[in-house]
Amino acid sequence: PTEIYTLPLHAALRCDTWKFSDSGFVDVAKARGADGVRVADPNAIRGALDTALASGRPYVVDIASDITAQAPTAYIGGD
């Protein structure tokens, strides 16, 4: 049987449980014969994806994001 484990909300929101160090995904891809680019500017994402798709080979697009950014809280109807 499959068991489902859940974390309390306060544990799920702890940054240290999911924060990655600067892992160098592009370097790993290149070491394995692929190509890649790291993107930090949101305006450059489309161009990076276009380049990756046009390359015709394995390609990593490593998108850096703001760790403090959060999506808006969903509204759950009720009283």
Image (cartoon, grey):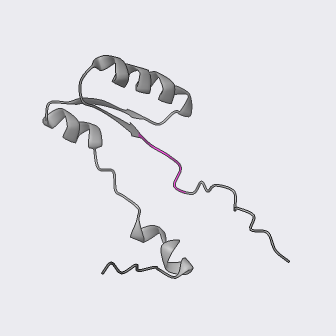
Residue 68 position, x and y percent, is: 57, 57
Front-lying residue, 31 or 5: 5
Residue at (28, 44) in percent of width and height:
24
Q: Is residue 66 magenta?
A: yes
Q: Tell me if residue 79 comes above or below residue 19 in the rendering.
A: below
Q: Tell me if residue 25 comes above or below residue 68 in the rendering.
A: above
> Would residue 36 appear left or right of 47 to someone viewing this image?
left
Q: Tell me if residue 14 comes above or below residue 69 in the rendering.
A: below
Q: Tell me if residue 35 comes above or below residue 14 in the rendering.
A: above
Question: Magenta residues: mostly which secondary structure?
Answer: loop
Front-lying residue, 3 or 25: 3
- For the record, the magenta segment spans 63-67
Residue 53 position, x and y percent, is: 36, 23
> Would residue 76 appear left or right of 32 to someone viewing this image?
right
Q: Is residue 70 magenta?
A: no
> Would residue 3 appear left or right of 58 to someone viewing this image?
right
Res 64 quadrant in image: top left
Residue 48 position, x and y percent, is: 42, 25
